[in-house]
């Protein structure tokens, strides 16, 4: 048994439900079959692998009704992660809700960059600025258990989710309510990671991002409002040799490099996302 009961009708069999759901979701999802399998599994209280392994099993009527409601919401554009309540990030299962941005695969590159920079630093101090679900803070802490990690966010609701993720995963992180660096006066770090809002307010992508918190996405008229704030204040919060690792939109790298230079920061490295587009920069104090 996988959370599905013996089949009573072909229409309730898990395999057929996956097929029907995938067909319904083709217009909204780049991965309709995966979405369908995960939604059927969630409705059934089963795992995706169990749904795949036992397509002949059937949902009971209550589970079938839950599935119908989930498919309706997904077809309307609601992120899959909000429907199933979690998203995997750097091999960690993180609880998410509409209070936080759904962690993206491209943001995992910031973890890789941070770990590389901290490889030879003992007990490194790390700040995840604008932590949301706690994804970056928790991934770094999971890989570097000796690190002293702070996750800061202006949203109390986001911090509630981040804190719960940390407790569930058994990872000790200091969670701090802060409007960017406002509550961090006098504190410095070996590494600051930040995935700030960087979409322009009129970006057409907002049409399909309406379920996610706009404050975590909207970077003002040119998409650089939050980035300017972070770049201006970051130098005062970096230890000697410390770095700021900043995610950005794929058209913004040149503008950010210019802004960073005005703030006394130099580009130490620049990275691309899974599609080969410019996606983040590693910044350190410019040489005088």
Image: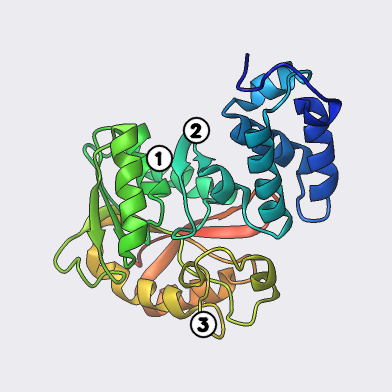
Name the spot of residue 273 as percent of width and height, x first. Answer: 62, 51
Locate residue 194: give its quadrant.
bottom left
Gap in Å between the C-alphas at discs 3 and 2? Answer: 32 Å
Q: Residue at x 66, y 22 (%)?
A: 4
Q: How many marks?
A: 3
Residue marked by disc 3:
220
Q: Earlier in the sequence, mark 1 or mark 2?
A: 2
Q: Mark 1 touching mark 3, by CB under 8 A?
A: no
Q: Quadrant of the C terminus?
A: bottom left
60, 83: nearer the viewer: 60
Compared with residue 64, is residue 26 higher up or lower down, i.e. above or below? below
Residue marked by disc 2:
91
Q: Is residue 147 left or right of residue 218?
A: left
196, 161: nearer the viewer: 161
Q: Residue at x 26, y 67 (%)?
A: 178
Q: Quadrant of the N terminus?
A: top right
For mark 3, give the secondary structure. loop
Q: Mark 3 touching mark 2, by CB under 8 A?
A: no
Gap in Å between the C-alphas at discs 1 and 3? Answer: 29 Å
Q: Is residue 85 left or right of residue 74?
A: left
Residue marked by disc 1:
139
Q: Earlier in the sequence, mark 3 or mark 2?
A: 2
Q: Residue at x 65, y 77 (%)?
A: 203
């Amino acid at each position: 048994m996988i959370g599905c009961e013996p089949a009573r009708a072909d229409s309730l069999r898990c395999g057929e439900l996956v097929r029907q759901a995938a067909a319904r979701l083709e217009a909204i999802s780049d991965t309709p079959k995966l979405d369908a399998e995960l939604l059927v599994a969630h409705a059934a209280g089963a795992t995706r692998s169990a749904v795949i392994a036992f397509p002949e099993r059937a949902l009971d009527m209550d589970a079938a009704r839950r599935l119908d409601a989930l498919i309706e919401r997904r077809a309307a554009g609601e992120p899959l992660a909000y429907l199933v309540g979690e998203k995997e990030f750097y091999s960690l299962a993180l609880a998410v809700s509409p209070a936080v941005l759904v962690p993206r695969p491209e943001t995992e590159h910031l973890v890789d960059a941070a770990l590389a920079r901290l490889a030879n630093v003992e007990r490194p101090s790390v700040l995840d600025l604008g932590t949301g679900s706690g994804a970056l803070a928790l991934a770094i802490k999971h890989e570097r258990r000796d690190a002293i990690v702070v996750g800061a966010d202006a949203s109390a609701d986001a911090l509630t989710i981040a804190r719960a993720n940390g407790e569930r995963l058994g990872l000790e992180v200091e969670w701090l309510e802060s409007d960017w660096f406002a509550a961090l006066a006098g504190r410095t770090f070996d590494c600051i990671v930040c995935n700030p809002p960087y979409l322009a307010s009129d970006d057409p992508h907002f049409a399909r991002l309406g379920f996610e918190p706009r404050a975590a996405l909207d970077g003002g008229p040119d998409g650089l409002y939050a980035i300017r704030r972070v770049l201006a204040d970051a130098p005062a919060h970096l230890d000697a040799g410390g770095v700021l690792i900043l995610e950005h939109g794929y058209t913004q790298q040149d503008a950010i490099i210019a802004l960073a230079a005005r703030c006394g920061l130099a580009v130490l490295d620049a990275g691309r996302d899974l599609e080969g587009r410019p996606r983040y920069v590693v910044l350190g104090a410019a040489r005088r």
